Amino acid sequence: MRYRSTRGTSTGLSFEEAVFEGLAPDGGLYIPHSIPQTPLSEIHQWSNLSFPQLATKIFRKFISHAEISDADLADIVTRSFGTFSTPEVTPLKKLPNVAVGNGNGDLENLYVLELFHGPTFAFKDVALQFLGNLFEFFLERRNRNSATKFGITVLGATSGDTGGAAIYGLRGKKNVDVFILHPEGRISPVQEQQMTSVLDRNVHNIAIEGTFDDCQDMVKAAFSDQKFRRRFHLAAVNSINWARILAQTSYYFYSYFAVLRRIGTPSGASSYAALTKIQYSVPTGNFGDVLAGYYAVRMGLPIDRLIVATNENDILHRFFQSGRYEKKQSRNGSEPVKQTLSPAMDILVSSNFERLLWYLSIEDRRSTSSDADVCAKHASANIVQWMRELRDKGGFTVPETIFNSSKGLFTSFCTSDALTSDAITRYYHHQYTLLHEAPKPYHGAERPALAYVLDPHTAVGVVAAEQLVATSTTPTTSSIKSTHTICLATASPGKFPEAVLKAINNNAPALSPQRGFKPLTYADIAPRELVALEGLPKRCLYIQSPGDKLDALFAVIEDNVGAQFPAKPLSKL
Ligand SMILES: *Cc1c(COP(=O)(O)O)cnc(C)c1O
């Protein structure tokens, strides 16, 4: 399997090259030359595999044997998911059946797919545990028979979750140093604790006086300084890295099978889709998670619909409403990015969306041309043009045919903070609305939970799912009932305790206290590993104004790893 840039100038890269480079030199994102379509009969054979076995099957299709052998791949995958606290890796749970609004939707078949059982309690661990092990594997192989050790310097900026997941994915790895920039005082105390309490020598946290965008700009500037980039072998772990997208396809397959098992596995592979409809609601920022779902569909998993759930930073929702992708402008000096209760989705543009646009473009062209190269060139030309318009004019509009085809699979919803908070309240307090009822006999495979604590990101996805079911135009109730909706749960509520505790404690319905509700504390909603972080020793460097912050960053990197990357080549090649 080879990789190419969405913008067309680089093609034929190996998986290893695509993973180490991250972003293509032409500014595009790497995508596989083709998406390996898998017949349903083969997919069916995967339905009872363990998570690591299943992930290995999927990843195998995108990585040639010459690059990683079967045994090595299985080993990398097993170690990556072995750090999760449950053998299921991403368990599927049934949500309580909480009626909404006018109550015309049937929400009986609503699930959460818990993606937060990794070391940092957010879904980014699924990808970054894998990426960390891939880096280590490729570096070890390069260094095996060489006297001089080849190492890399990972540099990234974080608004919270990515940095932690990257640090836990790379801590202690040989020949890798990782520098993560975060805006001082602007990430949550839990996230700050989590990152800075990692004391491994190869981990360097840097707090920057400024905003997340300032951090991001510094990282971009370092990557575009070619001399610096080459000398330190800079590598990126941000959400556009292909290995991250690939890693995330695994749980779409896994959860699809988990639903089928609950409702009774079909004996033959004839057609899953005829049996039931399975759709996913995905809380979205940079469009990485939901893009992985798109790849699963293109591989052949018969997912019925992907719901793109945004908070009020809704560039994607506006696209799926209108076909126009447009950055919000700052008005009257206000920041164009709105700070919401779901901060990991507070974005202005969605960096992975370019990949979907490329596929929509090439599909569109395929209706008029069968020449694969012609179609690919056309798609890349579109991307180059649109990204230029985005930069120069703040937005672009795609042709009608492309817009219409996007709606075949995707639906979007934008959720306000008020609705997010309301969902957290409803799903927790549901248990107190039931107490007066006699327990009903339940004939399903699994009794739904009576209460669930949603994190604010997950809540955005749940609200979107509820809205879709409620406004569904499906003609009969019975066909709605056969739809199962899986909401991706992207973080543990313990990572965002302020919003969660406020929603649950301050908005308790009048009946709840009478029926035994007591306000929750941090320890009630957080995994004990998170609670245990409080008070641990921390290590962090600070870059503060005044002065050139970029120079200061270069100096920090020089101080810490300069000796490993001599400024001048030791010998001329
Ligand atoms: C990163 C993140 C998201 C958004 O994921 P994308 O892949 O950027 O769409 C959602 N929820 C949480 C908790 C996250 O950390």
Image: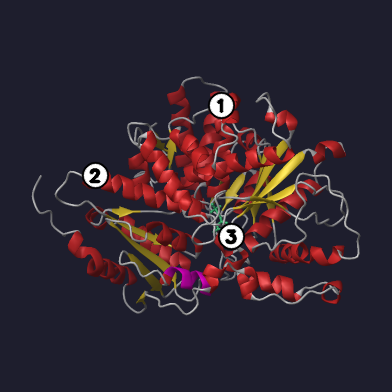
Marks 1 and 3, how far apart in space? 32 Å
Mark 1 or 2, nearer chain start: 1
Q: Quadrant of ligand 1?
A: bottom right
In depth, the one of 336 and 393 nearer the eye is 336
Determine whether the beta carbon of the residue marked 3 sits less than 8 angstroms from the nearest atom of ligand 1: yes
Where residue 227 sits: x, y (%)? 23, 55
Where residue 238 sits: x, y (%)? 43, 54
Check contact, mark 1 vs mark 2: CB within 8 A: no
Name the residue carrying label 3. Answer: 491
Check contact, mark 3 vs mark 2: CB within 8 A: no
Name the residue carrying label 1. Answer: 42
Name the residue carrying label 2. Answer: 142
Q: Give residue 258's mark.
A: none
Q: Amino acid at mark 2?
A: Arg
Is 82 located above or below residue 210 in the figure?
Answer: above
**Looking at the figure, which quarter contains the N terminus?**
top left
Disc 1 versus disc 3: nearer the observer: 1
Range of magenta residues: 188-195
In depth, the one of 533 and 382 nearer the eye is 533
